Structures are given as C-alpha cells and as structure tokens.
Image (cartoon, helix red, strand yellow):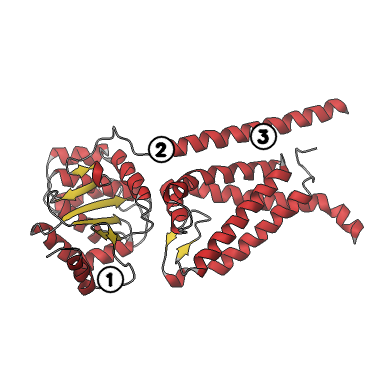
C-alpha cells in the first residue's frame, strides 16, 4: 500500500519536473530566437539604425517608414492605390523611404522578404516590391512562392545575375528577416500596412486607402 | 443530489481537466510556430508597455502548454487549475477593455491576433468562451482530485 503511494507520488513529481523543464527550455529558446542577430548577413542598403529596414535615399529628409508583409492583402491594396506616388517620391528623391518587410503571416512571407532584399542588392528593390504584390496569391500560405517562383519574378523584372539566383536559392537574408521582425516588435507595429512619416503614424482608417489623403499626409510631414 | 455529486465528481474533475488542459495546449501550440504574431497579439491590446507585451507574447505559449500538460496528466491540478483560471480572467479583462476602448483586434487566443476590421471582431463569443474556461479552472481548484490523475 505504502509502496504504491510512494510510487505514485514519484511519478507525479517526475511529471511536474519534466513539464517545468520543458517550459523553461521553451521560454529561453523563444526569447533568444526572437532577438536581433547582430551577426546576420544584411543587404548593403539595410540600416540597423532604421530598424534593419531597406533604405532608399538615405541622406534625404523627411523619413517615411513603410511596414508591410508581402502576403498581406491590405498591403497589396495599399500598393495599388499609393505605390505609384510613393515610387515617384523615391525616384525624385523627395524623401528617405525605409521598407520593413515583416514576416508574420507565414513562411512564404520570409521567402518573399528575402527575395526583395536580394533584389535590393541589384538596385531593383522598387520593381521587386511592386512585382511581389502583383503576384500575391489570393489565399495566404498557398505555396505559390515556393520553388523557382520568386526567381522567375526576378527574371520578369530584368534580374538575370547569378548572384541574385544564389541569394534566392541560399536564402541569404532569411536571418535578416528576424532582425526586421524584432525591430518591428520594439516599434510596436501590430498590423500591416503601417506607415510613419517622421515617426508619426498615419491614420489607418482614413489615410491609407485614400490617395488624396495619403498625399496630403505626406505633404504635412514635409514631402514637397 | 449531494450523493449524486459525490459519485460523479471524480468524473467531472477528469472532464474539466481534459477540456481546460486540451484548450490550453492547443492555444499554446498554435502560437509557438509564430512568435512574431503572438507578440503582436499582446501588443495590440495596448495595455502593457511594449517590452513587457513582447516578453509575454514570446513566453505565454509555453506556460499554456505546461499548465495544459499538468492538467491532462492530473499532476498539481489545484495550482494548475488556479493558474488556468487566472489566465482566463486576464484574457476576459483584456478583451473587455479593448472592446470598451473601441480597439478592433482579434484576441489572439489561438494564434491569430493584432488589428482587424471592426466588423470582424468577435468579442462576445471570445468572452463567453473564456468565462466557461475560467469556471472550469475554479472548479478544479476546489475539486482537484478525480479519476486517472497523478495527484493522490
């Protein structure tokens, strides 16, 4: 009788210890893997000071920060409505624009962000950014961007280099996407798209979907 | 009535353990694969300072899995039930304040989370669900001993 009770208590305590062990290991693992990796390979156009975002026109003011996820449907809508104007601003050097490709929707977000970074190395980020949104699948995590799909998108906008192909196939900047995620977490970005002009967040209910209001918001922030 | 309860209580405890434990494990497991989203879900409530919200987002899924495992195996049920109940109460308060303040978010309880369209919010059903789970946790605190449990 007492041996039985002792054995049961032993099993119980063993289970409690094992579960506690799992929780502690899990917590430590999660906290470490969510941090920025300062030794990660980052594209040349990326600035750690700008939340590890891809920077266009680094020496211009004001600064526009654009947080997106390439699988996010509302981000695609935003690109369709306002991408043209934003690309004009970039081409005419009217503002420094920093893109933060977040990757919370799923693994293909990571692949797409990697492809965008690889394209940035070829000075073709803007074209790739647009092409990715144009090629966005109608459902999230559909598998559309597996295999050679992203390589082919690069080819369709004129990127033919072996360096780009290696970058895509090796997933050279996948670790960098973790840095972007960590920086976005610190910046308290909780949905995409999210736009800041000189650190001031635009109103997502009125200024993202209306091209006139978006242009006005940028002008109010100093974009001539 | 009292006799009927006495007979059925060990089974009720088992059922409560399995339901609350199962839900907690599912909730945690769905978040583990996407910690970015888990942290976003906590930040979207706009209650905690950003660093604390992120910390909670990265660690809560493991606590849920741990407490869920203890409940299913029936070890340390009293305290696990209490932790489960406190967790549910916290969710209820968080969701209620988000609703009252006019935030449009998904509770993030099962891996979703963050800002959503105002017409897609499901605050009432989320609160009712968590209220039920809260009551299960309280019940287990008072009646932790049941069938097929490791606590003796």
- The subunit letter for the residue under badge 2 reads A
**SS state under label 3:** helix
Q: CA distance from mark 1 to mark 2?
A: 35 Å
Percent x, y of residue A48: 25, 41
Q: Which residue is mark 1?
A: A209
Percent x, y of residue A113: 27, 48
- Is the same chain shared between marks 3 and 1? yes
Lower position in the chain sequence, tag 1 or tag 2 = 2
Q: CA distance from mark 3 to mark 1?
A: 52 Å
- The subunit letter for the residue under badge 3 reads A
Picture layout, residue A166 above or below residue B120: above
Label for residue A33?
A: 2
> Is A10 on the left or on the right of B50, as rendered?
right
**SS state under label 1:** loop
- The subunit letter for the residue under badge 1 reads A
The C terminus of chain A sits in image quarter: bottom left
Lower position in the chain sequence, tag 3 or tag 1 = 3
- State the residue at coordinates (78%, 31%): A8
Q: Which residue is mark 3?
A: A16
> Is A34 on the left or on the right of B77, as rendered?
left
Percent x, y of residue A18: 62, 32
Nearer the observer, A190 or A133: A190
Is the C-beta separation of discs 1 and 2 under 8 Å? Answer: no
């Amino acid at each position: 009788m007492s041996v039985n009770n002792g054995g049961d208590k032993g099993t119980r305590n063993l289970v409690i210890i094992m579960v506690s062990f799992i929780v502690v290991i899990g917590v430590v693992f999660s906290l470490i893997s969510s941090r920025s990796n300062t030794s990660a390979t980052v594209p040349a156009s990326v600035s750690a000071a700008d939340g590890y975002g891809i920077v266009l026109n680094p020496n211009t003011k004001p600064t526009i920060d654009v947080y997106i996820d390439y699988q996010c449907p509302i981000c695609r809508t935003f690109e369709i409505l306002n991408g043209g104007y934003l690309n004009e601003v970039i081409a005419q050097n009217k503002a420094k624009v920093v893109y933060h490709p977040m990757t919370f929707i799923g693994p293909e977000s990571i692949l797409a962000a990697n492809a965008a970074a690889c394209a940035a190395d070829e000075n073709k980020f803007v074209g790739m950014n647009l092409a990715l949104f144009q090629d966005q699948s109608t459902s999230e995590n559909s598998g559309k961007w597996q295999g050679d799909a992203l390589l082919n998108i690069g080819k369709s906008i004129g990127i033919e280099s072996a360096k780009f192909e290696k970058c895509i196939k090796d997933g050279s900047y996948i670790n960098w996407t973790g840095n972007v995620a960590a920086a976005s977490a610190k910046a308290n970005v909780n949905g995409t798209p999210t736009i800041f002009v000189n650190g001031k967040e635009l109103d997502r209910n009125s200024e993202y979907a209306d091209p006139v209001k978006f242009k006005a918001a940028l002008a109010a922030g100093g974009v001539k | 009535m009292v006799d009927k309860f006495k007979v059925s209580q060990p089974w009720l405890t088992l059922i409560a353990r399995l339901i609350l434990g199962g839900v907690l494990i599912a909730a945690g497991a769905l978040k583990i694969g996407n910690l970015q989203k888990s942290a976003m879900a906590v930040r979207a409530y706009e209650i905690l300072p950003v660093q604390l919200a992120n910390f909670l987002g990265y660690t809560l899924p493991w606590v849920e899995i741990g407490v869920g495992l203890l409940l299913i195996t029936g070890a340390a049920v009293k305290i696990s039930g209490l932790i489960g109940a406190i967790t549910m109460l916290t969710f209820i308060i968080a969701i209620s304040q988000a609703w009252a303040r006019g935030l449009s978010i998904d509770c993030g309880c099962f891996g979703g989370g963050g800002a959503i369209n105002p017409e897609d919010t499901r605050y009432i059903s989320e609160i009712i669900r968590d209220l039920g789970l809260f009551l299960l946790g309280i019940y287990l605190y008072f009646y932790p001993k049941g069938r097929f449990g490791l606590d003796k």
